[in-house]
Image (cartoon, rainbow, N blue to C red):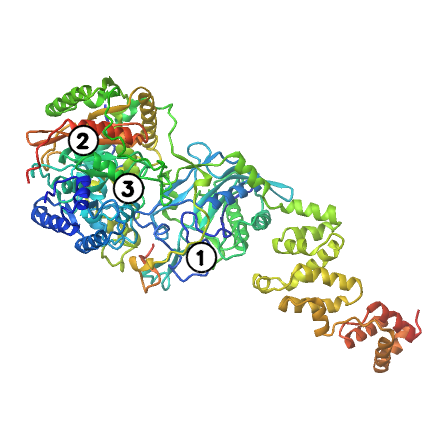
Amino acid sequence: MDLGISALNYVSGIKNNEFTVEEFISESLDHIKQVDEKLHAFLRINDFAIKKAKEIDAKIKSNQNVGRCYGMPISVKDNICIEGSKTTCASKVLENFIAPHTSTVVSKLHSEDSIIIGKTNLDEFAMGLSTEFSAYGPSKNPWNIDCVPGGSSGGSGVSVAANECIASLGSDTGGSIRNPASFCSVVGLKPTYGLVSRYGLVSYANSIEQIGPMTKTVEDSAFLLNIISGIDPNDNTTLDNKNQDYLSDIDAGISGKKIGIVTEMTNSDGLSADVLDATNNSIQTFEKLGANCEQVSLQMVPYTVAAYYTITSTEAGSNLARYDNVRYGYELDSSGFEFNSYISQARSKLGPEVIRRMILGGFVPSAGHAGKYFLKALKVKSKLISEIKHVFEKFDFLISPTVPIQPFKFGEKINDPVSFMMVDFNTVTANLTGIPAISVPYKITNGLPIGIQIMANHLEEHSMLQAAYALEKTVDLPEVPI
Amino acid sequence: MKSLVNEEEISDVAKLMKIDLEDHSAHIKRVQKMLEYFDILDRANVEAEEITVQETDLDKLRDDKHIPYDKNLLKFLKSYQEKYVKAPKLN
Amino acid sequence: MTKIGLEIHCQLTKLESKLFCSCKADYREFEPNTNICPICMGIPGSLPLLNKIAVEKATLIAMALDCSTPDKIAFFRKNYFYPDLPKNFQITQLNAYGNTSIGWEGKILVGAVKIRIRRIQLEEDPGRLIYEGATEKTKLTLVDYNRAGTPLVEIVTEPDFETPHQVREFLNILSDLLENLNVSDPGLEGAMRADANVSIEGGSKVEIKNIGSFHDLEKAVHFEITRQQSLVERKIEIIQETRHWDDGRKITVSARTKEEEAEYRYHLEADIPWVRINDTTKNQLQTHMPESISSKKERYVSKYGITSQVADILSSDKYFSELFEKANNETNAKDIANMITTDIMGLLDTREKREMSKLEGDHISDLVEYIKSNKITRASAKLALDEVIKNGKQLSEIIEDLDLGHVSDETTLSDIITEILDEETKAVEDAKQNPDIVNFLVGKVMQKTRGKADPELTLSLLKKHLGIN
């Protein structure tokens, strides 16, 4: 049995009786046992996976209605709640937190008979881009275990790349789906803000974050997006996508489309030589596919990293204030403590990156500093939104390499804060503007993956997926070496 | 000429955020570096911009209905005498 | 020149659910921590869901207070750590990016004084803290989150009050207004709370918090004015600060908490989009707004000929004005109004009594009719009212049950009068000298007939028997 098959091929495999759900799940669990000690993609495995697999097999056998997923194993980032199970956000502060509710996205997957095979590792509270900030140890890149898998949805990326599961749900605030997708050579999609419900996602920066699929193929992302998207009464910020079918006409091609090459994201100073090379190659590919590529400038891009960190620190400072260990968290008796010192004690369990964001988040919106930092960041965001709107009047898509560099070694970026922040340079624009973006695996150079990012206008996932599919079809990448 | 935000200010903010900075220098220095980078925002020339927000209509909001939460939430929380939530004493 | 401003918090108790979740808005009947859900408890992954009717009711309040209302409202986070705040921030409103709170720049008249309303905002109430044991020995704080998320409207006035009495007046007017609008029941415990700020002779503004009741508010303001005046006399500077009302010692004490230095890091609540409130909605709300108290009063006076004083009392009480509307058929309006204000208000003077009462509009109109047609005396009517309130039976039944029928039969009365005159020989003697003694004898007859005797007839018959004119 090929654990590396796509979701769509898995479904046909089940329908054609090539294997049963139980067989596939069982082998997946064995595989996880074999590789995950080294890769550490998972924080927790679902003990009821086999039981659920048997139930679904029974349903199939008795010709009952089966959900679209047919028991496929899907992993979920551990900042997405599932009722009755731990959701730690890879933090010590939520070590014992058991969620009392299930997120909308997981409810939808459950109702389509998918099997959530486990919860995946992340940078603590989704703050990071390498999974090095997980309080439970980093995940390793299956292409080279000395290298980071990207982040913050690093565990999700690894679990899909290493064939531990068919697909994963991650979350993307500044590139946290696309960055690990690029680093692990899988497809990662950040939907339009509001397309997918955030109910059940532990908030980090709630004005820009989204849950999205990480999959082996572009079609699989479209397949999952069909299931998880749509307006949700449990989330006031969701939009009505009128039940759009993202799989329909996905192979329509991009002949005649206008593609903008974002100058600020593709300039040779910012990219590594190998990434620059792959990017130029992809431009040629797009042209061969019949699209017209042209340089386009987004003047606000150089300010986006600063704006992003300012805005997200402010929101994180607020969203994480509730972790005072009073109502839930971990064991620490409050007897003998005074309120303020108890909270400080509780929060001392937060990791170093989270602590830094808390401090920034207290500083940048405070009276006396808000004008210089927070308000300016909001205005940069605003101006960027106008720029993007204007640019999409002319262009159908925008492209760039997903990450300016290839996967780096553990410890390499962690001590230089500015160089670290710059890894997000190409991805934060889509978050700040709310537009959809997808990373498509494009090349493996020196054994390390490079992904190409395609961005489209608001709610234009359907056409964006067509472009991603067209690009993907031109590429034939080696298997992951595990 | 770049000016670093001073250590005392950062310490004060940490207190506000209930963060106890035991290892002062490492965190403070790093935060200073990040704030210094944020100075780039001054050059964006965005003073005249209005902020952009998401909007919705009144009729899209939740109806005013009492729906009791049917699960015992208290058992998911840390509770005291199964009635109250226990918090540390206040000054 | 004394300046007093108020900050009033009013719960929208007439809503079914909380501001951001479907737990009950009125938490009072629940055991601790049983009116909670993941949303109002701020459980990770939960998102606030704004209550549509809360926005409408808050808008009604803004309109009733003559405020400008926005085309879009926005919510902000006020960030601070406290055990009664499940998220350690409160979702509230601010006017940081233009006017986005539920109302601003309104006014209300307190007698002849115009009190300006600076702004009105919609926000959530925190939970409640319970302290274990005495304060010094307190080892922990116990929290009940049933109230967390209850919808509040905060009304901030300009410092237009000059006396504590005006403040009290205003609060009464505001209570009646809110009750009349059917947005809140101010009589419920904790439903309306107020803080004040006081400054004298253009000096520093002092905030007073932690005031338990409106009665205490008047006292607190009065005390604070006195305190400041004495400082000024001794040429001591008044410090701008927050003080708490100490109910035990009946004084204000310096709070010296971090409240004054608080940094709230206000920013938009991104989980709730800005809500558009269009003119159509506003017009609809305006059209369906319950009639204002002043409009009712005017109508009672001009349409029904009720005296200004009675109209005043009747119109400002929601329960009784509704009873009046149900009972009256225009022709008997004056009598109904009088009966309500004179007799019924006294009998149903508490919330509990009103809730248990079985009195309906028809009972009152029947009673008024019976009195008019002499089927029952005013004195008996009072007994009948008592009974109706208890069991809600038809008036005719009650009159039979209690034998309250009017005694207007001359023969029967004469017999009774003869009895009385036999008993009260001294009075009969005195009556010849002092005609006023007849009233005493009338009283005796009324006593003997348990109030059923027709007073006029009794008087004339007595006079006849006594041979007086």
Say which residue label 2 marks. Answer: A440
Residue holding disc 3: A227
Q: Amino acid at mark 2?
A: Val
**Cβ–Cβ under 8 Å for marks 1 and 2:** no
Question: CA gap, disc 3 to disc 2?
Answer: 20 Å
Q: Disc 1 vs disc 3: which is toward the camera? A: 3
Same subunit, labels 1 and 3: the answer reads no
Q: Nearer the viewer, mark 3 or mark 2?
A: 3
Quarter of the picture containing the C terminus of chain A is top left
Label 1 in the same subunit as label 2: no
- Left or right: A106 in relation to C210: left
> How far apart are the alpha carbons under marks 1 and 2?
52 Å
Q: Name the quarter where the N terminus of chain A is drawn.
A: top left
| Residue A472 percent coordinates (x, y) | 17, 29
Q: Which mark is residue C457?
A: none
Q: Image height check: is A258 above or below B33?
A: above
Look at label 1 and name its amino acid: Tyr
Residue toward you, A423 or A70: A70
Mark 1 — residue?
A: C27
